[in-house]
């Protein structure tokens, strides 16, 4: 039946939510007690934990249907708290469904909603006090989960795709060369296809950054990349950032508020623009933002680039960000 098919698919199809493995390792390293609270049948829950390699990260496994009442009733979380010997006021639940959020909240536990299956609004309506798209958004703020910039004495801000510092943060349009782009990511992806005006416009019209990026990164479109893309992409990125952080005051303010701190984009997939927390990535987005931050502080609060001209300014920012550009590193998204 359907249950048997699901169990057959688990070993090959199941993947952890981004950042979950490192987050659990951090939690375990702190000596915190943990439990899985689920409405899934015990056999399925144990199979998933075993497949993901998470079995040893948890002290208890509570199955909702084995309690007097399953989720959204508070019984499963009350059972977990009792087994762990933890007071609700000292507990935190991470949930991805409205019924799970409601169960934890009813047991007096503060809840962070993970928006892998339901929207932030749906999880908040059920009682979540905070929502995140994945676990990177949590452990970026967990003490010691990610290291400070070597040699370890510089305050470091790790940001992800949902932060204002990222090109993927929605709601901050940019005007460049007479056109308005929904985000800096839309502009960056479109510039891969210089000479393909229809494809560029298709990217510009996408409702979200992820949809724009999906077109820009699709294997079927790679043969349409501009021949000079690897040489041009750095200046394209600087152009997008200059527009975003001068034309949107909220973005400028947030960037300037990071003064004195090292900026690191956390990315497990892109070692050119980001870094996976091990300092093996080039982190050129973080470096570009730090150079731009200094530039904006020098230009003063009234400075806004209108999206036209500025070639010399952009070239100077590129030269400061990539003082010794290496062709072998031209592997960014």
Image: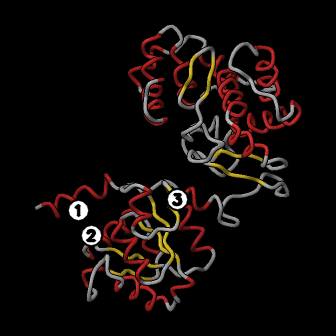
The image's mark for residue 44 is: 2
Quadrant where the N terminus is found in the figure: bottom left
Mark 3 nearby-residue class (10 Å; few <14, some 14–19, many ≥20): some
Q: Earlier in the sequence, mark 1 or mark 2?
A: 1
Look at mark 3 in the image and give the residue it sits on.
135
Q: Is residue 300 left or right of residue 220?
A: right
Q: Nearer the viewer, residue 266 or 291?
A: 291
Q: Earlier in the sequence, mark 2 or mark 3?
A: 2
Label 1–label 3 contact, CB within 8 A: no
The image's mark for residue 52 is: none
**Figure colour scheme:** secondary structure
Q: Work out how far the residue at label 1 is from the one at label 2, CA to CA, in angstroms.
A: 7 Å
Q: Is residue 242 left or right of residue 271?
A: right
Quadrant where the C terminus is found in the figure: top right
Specify the quadrant of the image occupied by residue 175: top right
Residue 9: image location, x then y, percent? 25, 55
Determine whether 330 is above or below 285 in the image.
above
Q: Work out how far the residue at label 2 is from the one at label 3, CA to CA, in angstroms.
A: 22 Å
Q: What residue is at 73 percent from the left and 24 percent from the top? A: 326
Give SS at disc 3: loop
Q: What residue is at 38 percent from the left and 80 percent from the top? A: 61
Q: Is residue 257 left or right of residue 27?
A: right
Give SS at disc 2: helix
Residue furthest top as drawn: 195
Look at mark 1 in the image and give the residue it sits on.
7
Determine whether 226 is above or below 8 in the image.
above
Residue 243: image location, x then y, percent? 68, 27
Q: Work out how far the residue at label 1 is from the one at label 3, CA to CA, in angstroms.
A: 25 Å
Label 1–label 2 contact, CB within 8 A: yes
Q: Nearer the viewer, residue 135 or 115?
A: 115
Give SS at disc 1: helix
């Amino acid at each position: 039946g359907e249950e048997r098919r699901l169990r057959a698919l688990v070993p090959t199809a199941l993947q952890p939510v981004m950042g979950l493995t490192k987050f659990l390792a951090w939690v375990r390293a702190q000596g915190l007690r943990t439990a899985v609270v689920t409405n899934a049948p015990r056999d399925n829950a144990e199979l998933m934990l075993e497949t993901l390699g998470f079995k040893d990260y948890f002290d208890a496994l509570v199955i909702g249907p084995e309690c007097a009442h399953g989720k959204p009733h508070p019984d499963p979380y009350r059972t977990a708290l009792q087994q762990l010997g933890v007071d609700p006021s000292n507990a935190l639940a991470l949930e991805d469904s409205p019924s799970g959020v409601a169960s934890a909240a009813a047991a007096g536990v503060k809840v962070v909603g993970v928006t892998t299956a339901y929207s932030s609004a749906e999880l908040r309506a059920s009682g979540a006090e905070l929502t995140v798209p994945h676990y990177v958004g949590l452990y970026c703020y967990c003490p010691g989960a990610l290291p400070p910039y070597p040699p370890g004495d510089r305050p470091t801000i790790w940001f992800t795709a949902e932060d204002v510092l990222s090109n993927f943060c929605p709601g901050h349009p940019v005007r460049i060369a007479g056109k308005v782009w929904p985000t800096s990511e839309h502009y960056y992806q479109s510039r891969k296809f210089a000479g393909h005006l229809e494809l560029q416009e298709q990217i510009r019209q996408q409702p979200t950054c992820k949809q724009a990026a999906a077109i820009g990164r699709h294997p079927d479109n790679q043969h349409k990349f501009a021949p000079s893309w690897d040489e041009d992409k750095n200046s394209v990125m600087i152009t997008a950032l200059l527009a975003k952080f001068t034309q949107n005051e909220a973005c400028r303010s947030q960037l300037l508020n990071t003064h004195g701190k090292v900026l690191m984009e956390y990315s497990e997939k892109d070692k050119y623009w980001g870094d996976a927390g091990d300092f093996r990535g080039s982190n050129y987005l973080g470096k570009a933002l730090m150079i731009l931050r200094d530039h904006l502080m020098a230009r003063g609060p009234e400075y806004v680039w209108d999206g036209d001209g500025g070639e010399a300014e952009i070239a100077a920012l590129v030269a400061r960000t990539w003082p010794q550009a290496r062709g072998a590193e031209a592997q960014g998204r």
